[in-house]
Amino acid sequence: MPIMPHQNARLIGPKHAVTPVARRRFLQVGGAMVAAAYGQARLPGAAAAEDQSSAVPRVDLHVHLDRSTIDQVAALGRQRQVRLGVVEHAGTKENRYPVVLSCDSDLAAWLAQLEGKGVYRGIQAEWTDWMGCFSRQMLGRLDYVLTDAMTFPGKDGQRVKLWEAEAAQRVDFSDPEAFMDRYVAWHIEIIEGQPIDIFANTSWLPAPLAPHYDRLWTPARVRAIARAAARRGVALEISAGYRLPKLPFLRTARQCGVRFSFGTNGRYPHMGRIDYCLEMARELALGPDDVFVPQGAPKAARQG
């Protein structure tokens, strides 16, 4: 809000001209008064919420090494004062990616690449059959496992990448409500049926449906997913890369007792930019215990 002139300012004429020094003093005092008034005008509890959210972990647990090296990524994390978690796609070779970890030896090489780099080490699990690719002992060397719902069963039951253009030919989007019912059920099937620590890219929608986000993500649908996540101890990702979920989704999820994780799905140099995550943490008054940070072996090593 602009600072309005004092009501008696019109009385100041040449005889009462303000010297530069006096003017600077006036602005300093006036600025301090405005700042003090602003601080007093803040909503009750705002300062406490800011203090609490400032204590949440500065982590980005959804980072990929595409187009970069681990040394470049680790340096960027230190520069941005964010602890990074680096993941690679993992599962059977039917999952089409430039790199797919598909056996213990693949995973061992991946872990060795990240050893001593000051980052958390995870995998992005693909489809529903990834657990059979790895021994529990090797999975126990990871810090966490994340996955998402963006690979979806098509009309023929085969895996479809919903972000690709061909998805519209293999998945029926003509009835958005029917698709959302299937999509929510797919979320719950993954959360309840797989030993994951983080559900990533939460609330993302395929391009044909994204403009209708607010209508399609009803409170009932959000609660169904959030309650499953809370039951299974799965953290829902707040994605700074997608700026999702939106605040109403997050508020409903928080009411269901879920924990959250922070991620960007970042490729170099976009990892570690977690401003949206921190903004949502302030809005939700999250504390340190509300944000997932890897501790010990991942669920896949304990329950896989």
Image (cartoon, rainbow, N blue to C red):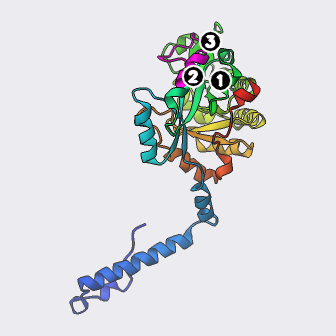
Magenta stretch: give its range. 92-110
Q: What is the three-letter code of the residue carrying label 3?
A: Gly
Outermost residue, left direction?
14
Q: Secondary structure at mark 3?
A: loop
Does the magenta run of residues contain 130? no
Q: Mark on residue 138?
A: 1
Badge 2 is on which residue? 108
Front-most of residues 186 and 219: 186
Q: Is residue 173 at least partly visible in the picture?
A: no
Above or below residue 118? Residue 301 is: above
Front-most of residues 32 and 214: 32
* Magenta: main secondary structure: loop
Q: Residue at x 50, y 12 (%)?
A: 166
Which quadrant is the C terminus positioned in?
Answer: top right
Q: Residue at x 68, y 26 (%)?
A: 187
Q: Residue at x 29, y 82 (%)?
A: 23
Outermost residue, bottom direction?
15
Front-most of residues 128 and 21: 128
Which quadrant is the N terminus positioned in?
Answer: bottom left
> Which circle's residue, 2 or 1, is located before the other in the chain?
2
> Which circle's residue, 2 or 3, is located before the other in the chain?
2
Image quarter for residue 249? top right
x and y percentages locating residue 10 in the rendered image: 31, 85
Badge 3 is on which residue? 154
Q: Secondary structure at mark 1?
A: helix
x and y percentages locating residue 171 in the rendered image: 59, 14
Q: What is the three-letter code of the residue carrying label 1?
A: Met
